[in-house]
Amino acid sequence: MSSKHRSQIAARRQPRSPVFAALGDETRLALVAKLCAGQRRSISQLTKGSNLTRQAITKHLRILQSVGIVRCVRTGRESRFEFNPQPMEGIREYLDFVSQQWDFALSRLRSFVED
Amino acid sequence: METRIEKRMELKAPVSRIWRALTDYREFGAWFRVKLDGPFVPGQVSRGQITYPGYEHVKWEAVVQKMEPERLFSFTWPHPKALAEDDYSPDYSQEPTTLVEFRLEKTANGTLLVLTESGFDHLPADRRLEAFRRNDGGWTEQMKNIETHVKQTP
């Protein structure tokens, strides 16, 4: 293996997707689900209905902000959070692709076992 | 946000038939389109070569996880990037994988097959995305071919 090739491989070996990692948590998924509705929400609104403290919710929001799924918008003295779907588009596209491949593989399986 | 894939499908064949189609390496290879080197053994790497037209250069590698007769067959694999790299050879100590599970359940008319693929949160998404974007045209074409084939030979 050439050293050039090796360095290409090393370059490809990125850390796990930060977006996926950020979503790999039930609380954060729930926050994203709430924000997906489209309205900007304050920390109090996001804390309401959960068993977590304001501080804990803030911490989770920071993580979502760091990967760009959530944006913080200041209106007056209050910070409101909104959903930013852009970093997720790629993931959805990718899952759709894999999902479609399974549809085709499974239809081959069907014709294989039902004939 | 769903980071797993689930497919449910009812098949008009007994559970034992589906189990064989999934776990006999020759039968699996026939519908999945891969030429496997040998039988599936839990805990062991399964190797082979894709036989899918246009992708014959792609290696198949997976680690068989569970084989609970007529109930559950599962494996992990470091898939689609293989499509992007001709000389791809995975190193399982390094590579993130997804988990594929086939579950079977007897129904009145045959068998319910539930397929799930999970663990996408471990994938370095950027690279995967790049891999599939580069191959997207090809895949779309292949999918049409299969669809035609399935329709012609029901």
Image: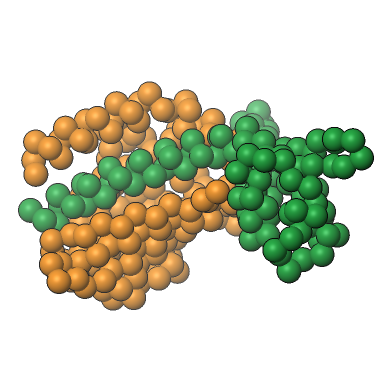
Chain colours: A green, B orange
Task: Place residue A85 in its image quadrant.
Answer: top right
- The answer, for residue B50, to whether it is visible in the render is yes
Rendered view: A23 above or below A73:
below
Q: Position of residue B143 (x, y in %)?
A: 28, 33
**Residue at image location 22% in from the left, 30% down from the top:** B145
With B1 as the anchor, is A82 left or right in this view?
right
- Please state if B108 lies on the left or on the right of B90 as rendered: left
Q: Nearer the viewer, residue B64 or A105?
A: A105
Q: Is residue B35 left or right of residue B98?
A: left
Q: Is residue A96 left or right of residue B51?
A: right
Query: In terms of image quadrants, where is residue B23?
Result: bottom left
Q: Is residue B133 shown above or below A105? A: above
Total of numbered circles in the picture?
Answer: 0
In the displayed orientation, state which residue is furthest to the bottom: B69
Q: Position of residue A4 (x, y in %)?
A: 65, 28
| Residue at the right extreme of this rendering | A77
How far across and down, in percent of the image, does residue B136 sit?
Answer: 41, 27
For image coordinates 74% across by 45% down, the residue present is A41
Q: What's the residue at 34%, 34% (across, down)?
A: B55
Residue B96, x across and y down, in percent: 57, 52
The image quadrant where one finds the C terminus of chain B is top left
- Residue toward you, B115 or A53: A53
Q: Can see residue A13?
A: no
Residue at 80% x, 55% y: name it: A44
